[in-house]
Amino acid sequence: MPDPRFFDDMGPASLQELARLGGAELGDVSLGSRSIAHVAPLDAADGRAVSFFSDPKRRDAAATTQAGACFVRPEHSDMLAPGCAALLTAHPQAAWAAAATRLHAPRRHEPLSASIHPDCELEDGVRLSPGVTVGQGARIGRGTHLSPGAVIGPGVTIGRDCLIGGNAVIGFAIIGDRVSIHAGAVIGEAGFGAAGGPRGVVDLPQLGRVVIQDGVTVGANSCIDRGAFTDTTIGENTKIDNLVHVAHNVRLGRNCVLAAYTGLSGSTVVGDGVAFGGKAGVADHLTIGSGASIGASASVFKDVPAGETWTGFPARPLKRWLRETAWLSRMAGGRGTRG
């Protein structure tokens, strides 16, 4: 269920209403009055949640889900667990997006003349520069300094002895102690999620958070997206350079180093002590083992084992890349030809 510090509860809604909003049909019309309070993934849903099922690879989760209802293609409806009401549609994700928008709304800054909301909590010793905005329900710890123009969203928690740079924007986030977020960084904006629907591509609501642990540094103009359902997490003492992008649901370990222009795609899992060279890129849903190193400009499309160094396009182990590069150089120079 989305964190109420960051999302307002707009429910409940009946299955009949959700079916209408999503352009779906109820598999069993007698269940139209069933009440739904929130959205959730198949494997985390309860009887008052609605989910979606569009990938047959997740048939095990569909077969055991506790969800009260699920948007599903007609040909997949028999894969749902008993008791889960089927909402039949050719576009399950887009229909679910309409339901999620009906049931949950991101909390926004209240329209007040004061930039520091009276409902926020500031410990003694918090330093606020000119032009700072702090939303309702935010909590900021002792010794933290907010530079000019910083914007702290509703419900955000920031620990002690942190530095928030000028014009940094933070929302939907829980931040530990001794964290430095440099100028222009954006923490907690919606991750990139979209699905095709009958009227074209629609945005998928992003209902998770960002969790940044103690001692982390986030460089200027870097972006860390909030999770779609689960949290985007940054481990203790990790150092992120300027102009880095961390996508939704990424789990980044402790003591990692990310040089400028690194990009981590959604749901990447990174172990502890991993180093990324400048412009390194990682495809989604991959695992980078602890202690690995990714070379500058490398493009990673496979899981990287712990402790290995990979580079190149596509990325591969360093020794292999060196051998292949040397061979190509010989071939290009004519030294490997006969005649």
Image (cartoon, rainbow, N blue to C red):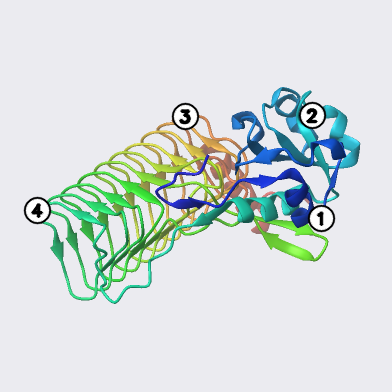
For the residues labelled 2 and 1, the Cα–Cα distance comes to 20 Å
Closer to the chain start, of discs 1 and 4, is: 1
Q: Are marks 2 and 3 in contact (CB under 8 Å)?
A: no
Mark closest to the chain's N terminus, 1 or 3: 1
Q: Which mark is residue 306?
A: 3
Q: Which residue is mark 4?
A: 124
Query: In terms of sequence position, does the residue under pointer 2 or pointer 3 come before the other?
Result: 2
Residue flagged by tag 1: what amino acid is it? Gly
Q: Which residue is mark 1?
A: 23
Left or right of residue 182, residue 72 in this image: right
Provide the secondary structure element on which disc 2 rests: loop
Question: Given contact means CB atoms under 8 Å apart, are the residues at marks 2 and 4 in contact?
Answer: no
Element carrying mark 4 = loop
Say which amino acid is labelled 4: Asp
- Image marks 1 and 3: residues in contact by CB distance under 8 Å: no
- In primary-sequence order, the first of circles 2 and 4 is 2
88 lies left or right of 302 = right
Nearest-to-viewer mark from 1 and 4: 1
Q: CA distance from mark 1 to mark 3?
A: 46 Å
- The image shows residue 283 at horizontal and vertical percentages of 60, 47
Residue 80 - label: 2
Judged from the image, the secondary structure of the residue bearing numbered disc 3 is loop
